[in-house]
Amino acid sequence: MDDVGNQSGCGSYDVEEDSSPSVQNDRKFGIEFRVIGKGVYLFTPNAIEVDIKLYNICGRLQQTIYKGVLTKGGHTFMPDIKRSGIYFAILRTNKFKESLKIIRF
């Protein structure tokens, strides 16, 4: 909301195409985690165990998007967001944690 020009690259949940640069790109691990269209995109260079959860602005868990082992490559997940608001997708692995801000209009 404070990022009118999308300076931080957070992206918007309701955009059809992702015109912003990668939201989160952990170069050390080669992982890419970003908003793409109405989904959340995760690229992993190797098989990895992940836990992706969706929280509302108050920090309440809304949904477990995915929990388990992913093969290497790109994966797109479609969170079930029914109400307008600000949400956070949190990616956890055994080595790091990343977050995405999702704005639903």
Image (cartoon, grey):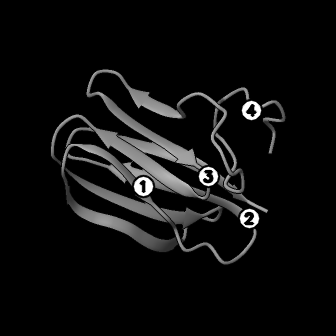
Q: Residue at x 55, y 74 (%)?
A: 80
Residue that sits furthest to the bottom in the current view: 82
CA gap, disc 2 and disc 4: 17 Å
In the rendered image, which residue does mark 2 sit on?
85
Compute the Cα span from label 1 to label 3.
10 Å
Name which residue type carries label 2.
Answer: Gly
The residue lying at 34 percent from left, 21 percent from top is: 27
Q: Residue at x 42, y 55 (%)?
A: 76
Q: Nearer the viewer, mark 2 or mark 4?
A: 4
Label 3: how many Cα within 10 Å (few below 14, some 14–19, many 20+) = some
Whether 101 is drawn above or below 44: the answer is: below
What's the amino acid at mark 4?
Answer: Asn
Name the disc covering residue 6, or none. 4
**Of helix, strand and loop, which one carries label 2?**
strand
Q: Which quadrant of the figure contains the N terminus? A: top right
The amino acid sitting under disc 3 is Gly
Q: Earlier in the sequence, mark 1 or mark 3?
A: 3
Mark 4 closeness class: few <14, some 14–19, many ≥20 residues within 10 Å: few
Q: Nearer the viewer, residue 64 or 44?
A: 44
Question: Residue farthest to the front?
Answer: 17
Identify the mark nearer the N-term, 1 or 4.
4
Q: Gap in Å between the C-alphas at discs 3 and 2?
A: 16 Å
Circles 1 and 2: CB distance less than 8 Å?
Answer: no
According to the image, label 1 marks what residue?
76
Q: CA distance from mark 3 to mark 4?
A: 15 Å
Residue 4 found in image quarter? top right
> Does residue 80 appear to the left or right of 41 in the view shown?
right
Label 2: few (<14), some (14–19) or many (≥20) C-alpha neighbours in 10 Å: few
